Amino acid sequence: MNRINDLFTRKSKNLLSIYFCAGHPTLDGTAEVIRALESKGIDMIEIGIPFSDPMADGPVIQDAATKALRNGMSLRTLFAQLEGIREAVKMPLILMGYMNPIYRYGYENFFKECKRIGIDGTIIPDLPFKDYMEQVKPIADKYDIRVIMLITPETSDERIRFIDENTDGFIYMVSSAAITGAQKEFNEAKQRYFNHVNSMGLHNYRMIGFGVSNKQTLESAQLNANGAIIGSKFVQLLEQYGNPSAACDALLDALEE
């Protein structure tokens, strides 16, 4: 069974997934960050593939991507760094990146390498659904890689149901139609969005991301979905502390305050 599906089968509530950008703050720290997060009890990890024009990301992750690229990170380098990661890490691993570097690498080569390395899923924010259905899904299914699709408060019910019917793993619920970045709380409009999606009877599990950074937003996300995804807050702490274990400890402390 794919590790993402297995995770949700075993633990369907209060999940915590963490995003970081490969190659930031140092080029060679990718595997160390992954091992540290697993040792701290994090449920799932999104590994960012840095790109020069990360349109869905806010200033924190944009800055991390820029620094990672300057450090020399590339998709090919990332795969090399993940070689043997499954000897020590059991949790689901997801690659999150934009179409350009994946398309240039080649869809077949990309998903084949994901399977070989032990990657369980991908998130490609700028992947058109038509391209997903016609070009990407057949290859991803061939290698048992989940392609996670995003929905926002602007996504129509028809589109949400279509995504639900044609994907597996979980649906990434973006908390707002904005870029990534920490928020102090989720307002009434976001709560209505969460409630509406929950009332639709979707078969996929759901994770809420974009803006989760403190106890209030974490608890709201975990109450309104199967779990929460944290990115910008951890990326900030990782740069601040340099040490992934210390950064994770600081994050977990912040989520208790």
Image: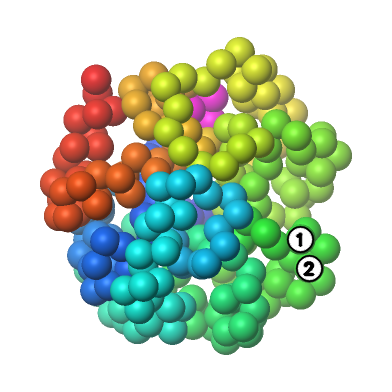
Q: Is residue 14 among the parts visible in the rendering? A: no
Compared to residue 37, the image places residue 184 above or below, namely above
Q: How is the image coloured?
A: rainbow
> Where, by quadrant of the figure, is residue 108 drawn?
bottom right
Label 2 is placed on what type of residue?
Answer: Asp
CA gap between label 1 and label 2 equals 5 Å
Tell which residue pokes out farthest to the right in this image: 158
Compared to residue 224, the image places residue 205 above or below, namely below
> Where, by quadrant of the figure, is residue 193 drawn?
top right
**Would you say 255 lies left or right of 229 here?**
left
In this rendered view, identify the residue nearer to me: 16 or 234: 234
Label 1 is placed on what type of residue?
Answer: Pro
Residue highlighted by disc 2? 131
Please rate how many residues cluster around mark 1, counting C-alpha atoms within 10 Å: few if below 14, some from 14 to 19, many from 20: few
**Would you say 207 lies left or right of 77 here?**
right
Where's the C terminus, which quadrant? top left
Asked if labels 2 and 1 touch by Cβ distance under 8 angstroms, the answer is yes
Count every numbered label the image shows and give the total: 2
* Residue 184 screen position, x and y as percent: 42, 22
* Residue 56 screen position, x and y as percent: 59, 50
Q: Is residue 204 among the parts visible in the rendering? A: yes
**Would you say 74 lies left or right of 189 here?**
left
* Residue 227 screen position, x and y as percent: 46, 35
Q: Secondary structure at mark 1?
A: loop
Compared to residue 92, the image places residue 198 above or below, namely above
Q: Which mark is residue 128?
A: 1
* Residue 191 screen position, x and y as percent: 60, 18
**Would you say 117 lies left or right of 210 here?**
left
Residue beneath the point at 40% across and 72% down = 69
The span shown in magenta is 221-225
